[in-house]
Image (cartoon, rainbow, N blue to C red):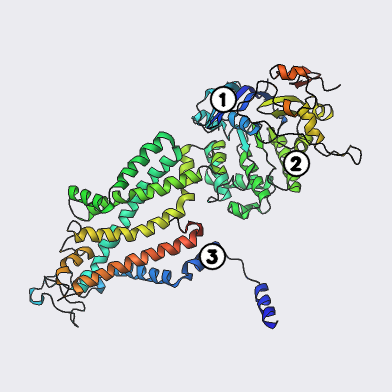
């Protein structure tokens, strides 16, 4: 059985302009020691789905309307949002790394104070142990001179370093699942590669499962075993990393791959952007949300509702069209 | 040309990196008036501590042979209607002034911060209830509110502190509430929640330290105002009364002899003016040194 199973998760936001169905019936699962990727463009609901699993959606305006988040046999959505069960799972069992390292650390507390309070909360360590363990963690995430840097404040670290500190904090209590919400968006490309390699190493070492949430297919290509592609609050395609990259089936996935440069392509091949804009999530039509931008659309797409995921050769695709032809 | 090169060289000279404290000190002491205020405050505190050694006479000593004496070598600032030495009373008067000022601000800051923090953090109906009560409290003129409380509880230093403390809560509550609303939207608060911290932990360990600079500055600036109000209450006869020495009541006792014995009122008046001015200047300097962005908001 999977370590974490999300079933039919629906998170809606009530705004002044109408109901936004940010996450509309998303299901996915992750096994122990597995790395999965959740890919989609800005505003497709990938971050919200992750925040929802830990009930971190601010309510109002957000609300988890429906769904199940089964973690180790318990439905996390049954717990009250700020109750002690939920708090012990956050950070202790499932930890999140956010995308903005510059603002995700408290500027008035030293790095030691911030890692230390995690250790105190979840592992009940005393100050001396906290210090030893924190230094150990900083060394593991590759911060040089950890004994001295541990008393530094966040502003004394660079962006990449801060993200390393965030990784150290997230892993400090040895969680079962690490959710990395666009962990490399705010750092430059060389640092990106280092951070990803570091995370892969650490999750292997700690036997942690990793969910990489990103808009960059290149980020997940190398590390993820399975990939879920999201569009407008739903998963439109899922499958193993190889399948998605070698034989994408949903028009959106095909479009995404066409606009990423590849090394195995003939020289001079032009990148093809996806035409149009992502849909406004307010007052969505019941038909496929990708329809206005889809080059493959047929009459059936315009007449019938958005199709559910169906199995095609080991992948799951939500599309009426057989794009292989 | 030569001048330009000289300037260039000066610019390129190696300068040691400036630590946070050095930068703070440079801005803080950079303005002479702030330094002046700080020196005045330090003097006041020293005088208050060593009043017994400095004061030439016992401030309660009534001497009916020397009623309303003019300033002279014997009594530098003359004597009041009961023959008490004005200078000695002025010196001892610092004590209640400083105690009332700091105790009041302590009460107001603690209560105001807690109320503002709770209101801002939880929002919704909790915020509405707390902040509307604060608004109602603010609707009364501060002095009038203090007057009513003092009238109900009676005079004396303790009641003055309570009265002024309650009257000063709204300022702190409003600032803290606004700060909390801003700070709680930061990523590190969401990150903190995702790491499993309780609301109380986030409020005390993450929001309060970040809201500290404006609060400290507000406190410094408000001490002056509280001292002024204490003097006002004492002037009106509700505050600290003779034979205890308080500047406000000294001004009030002397004001109908302004023409014959001006020092009776003018001396404590100047003392009040000086400390309020100093506190305001130090508050200003603190604001500019701690967080230049607060200029104009506080």
- Name the element at disc 1: helix
Name the chain under label 2.
A
Q: Nearer the viewer, residue A187 or B93?
A: A187
Q: Is B168 left, or right, of A229 in this rendering?
A: left
Q: Is B134 left, or right, of B61 in this rendering?
A: right
Give the distance between the C-alpha atoms of the residues marked 3 and 2, in whole angstroms: 40 Å
Give the distance between the C-alpha atoms of the residues marked 1 and 2, in whole angstroms: 30 Å
Q: Which residue is mark 1?
A: A76
Name the chain under label 1.
A
Q: Specify the label residue B23 is tagged with.
A: 3
| Displayed quadrant of residue A310 | top right
Q: Nearer the viewer, residue A63 or A272?
A: A272
Percent position of residue A294, x then y: 76, 27
Q: Is A198 left, or right, of B255 in this rendering?
A: right
* Upstream in sequence: badge 1 or badge 2: 1
Q: Residue at x 45, y 62 (%)?
A: B286
Q: Which residue is mark 2?
A: A197
- Name the element at disc 2: helix
Note whether residue A30 is visible.
no
């Amino acid at each position: 059985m999977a370590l974490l199973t999300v079933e039919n998760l629906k998170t809606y936001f009530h705004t002044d302009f109408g109901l936004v169905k940010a996450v509309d019936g998303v299901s996915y699962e992750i096994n122990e020691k597995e790395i999965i990727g959740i890919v989609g463009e800005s505003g497709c609901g990938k971050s919200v789905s992750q925040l929802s699993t830990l009930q971190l959606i601010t309510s109002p305006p957000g609300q988890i309307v429906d769904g199940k988040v089964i973690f180790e046999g318990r439905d996390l959505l049954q717990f009250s949002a700020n109750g002690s069960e939920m708090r012990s799972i956050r950070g202790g069992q499932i930890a999140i790394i956010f995308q903005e390292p510059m603002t995700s650390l408290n500027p008035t507390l030293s790095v030691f104070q911030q890692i230390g309070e995690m250790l105190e909360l979840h592992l009940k360590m005393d100050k001396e142990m906290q210090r030893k363990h924190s230094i150990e963690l900083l060394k593991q995430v590759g911060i040089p001179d950890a004994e001295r840097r541990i008393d530094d404040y966040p502003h004394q670290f660079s962006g990449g370093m801060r993200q390393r500190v965030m990784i150290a904090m997230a892993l400090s209590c040895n969680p079962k699942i690490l959710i990395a919400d666009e962990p490399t968006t705010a750092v430059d490309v060389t640092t990106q590669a280092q951070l990803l390699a570091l995370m892969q190493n650490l999750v292997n070492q700690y036997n942690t499962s990793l969910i990489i949430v990103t808009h960059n297919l290149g980020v997940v290509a190398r590390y993820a075993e399975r990939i879920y592609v999201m569009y407008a609050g739903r998963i439109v395609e899922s499958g193993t990393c190889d399948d998605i990259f070698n034989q994408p089936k949903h028009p959106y996935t095909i479009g995404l791959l066409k606009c990423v440069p590849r090394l195995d392509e003939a020289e001079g091949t032009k990148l093809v952007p996806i035409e149009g804009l992502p849909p406004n999530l307010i007052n969505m039509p019941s038909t496929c949300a990708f329809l206005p931008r889809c080059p493959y659309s047929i009459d059936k797409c315009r007449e019938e509702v958005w199709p559910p995921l169906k199995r095609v050769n080991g992948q799951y695709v939500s599309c009426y069209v057989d794009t292989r032809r | 040309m030569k001048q330009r090169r000289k300037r260039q060289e000066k610019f390129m000279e190696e300068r040691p990196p400036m630590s946070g404290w050095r930068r703070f000190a440079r801005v803080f002491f950079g303005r002479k008036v702030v330094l002046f205020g700080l020196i005045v405050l330090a003097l006041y505190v020293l005088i208050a501590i060593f009043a017994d050694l400095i004061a030439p006479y016992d401030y309660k000593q009534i001497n009916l042979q020397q009623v309303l004496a003019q300033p002279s070598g014997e009594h530098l600032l003359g004597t009041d209607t009961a023959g008490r030495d004005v200078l000695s009373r002025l010196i001892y008067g610092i004590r209640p002034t400083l105690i009332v000022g700091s105790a009041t601000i302590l009460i107001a800051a603690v209560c105001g911060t807690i109320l503002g923090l709770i209101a801002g953090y939880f929002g919704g109906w909790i915020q509405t209830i707390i902040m509307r009560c604060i608004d109602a409290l603010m609707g009364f003129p501060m002095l009038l509110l203090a007057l009513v409380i003092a009238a109900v509880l009676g005079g004396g230093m303790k009641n003055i502190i309570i009265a002024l403390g309650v009257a000063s809560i709204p300022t702190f509550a409003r600032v803290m509430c606004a700060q909390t609303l801003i700070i709680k939207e930061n990523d590190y608060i969401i990150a903190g929640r995702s790491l499993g911290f309780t609301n109380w932990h986030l409020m005390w360990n993450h929001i309060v330290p970040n809201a500290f600079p404006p609060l400290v500055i507000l406190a410094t600036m408000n001490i002056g105002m509280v001292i002024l109000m204490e003097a006002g209450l004492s002037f009106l006869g509700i505050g600290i009364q003779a034979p205890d020495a308080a500047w406000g009541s000294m001004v009030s006792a002397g004001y109908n002899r302004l023409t014959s014995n001006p020092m009776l009122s003018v001396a404590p008046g100047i003392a009040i003016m000086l400390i309020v001015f100093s506190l305001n200047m130090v508050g200003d300097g603190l604001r500019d040194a701690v967080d230049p962005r607060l200029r104009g908001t506080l």
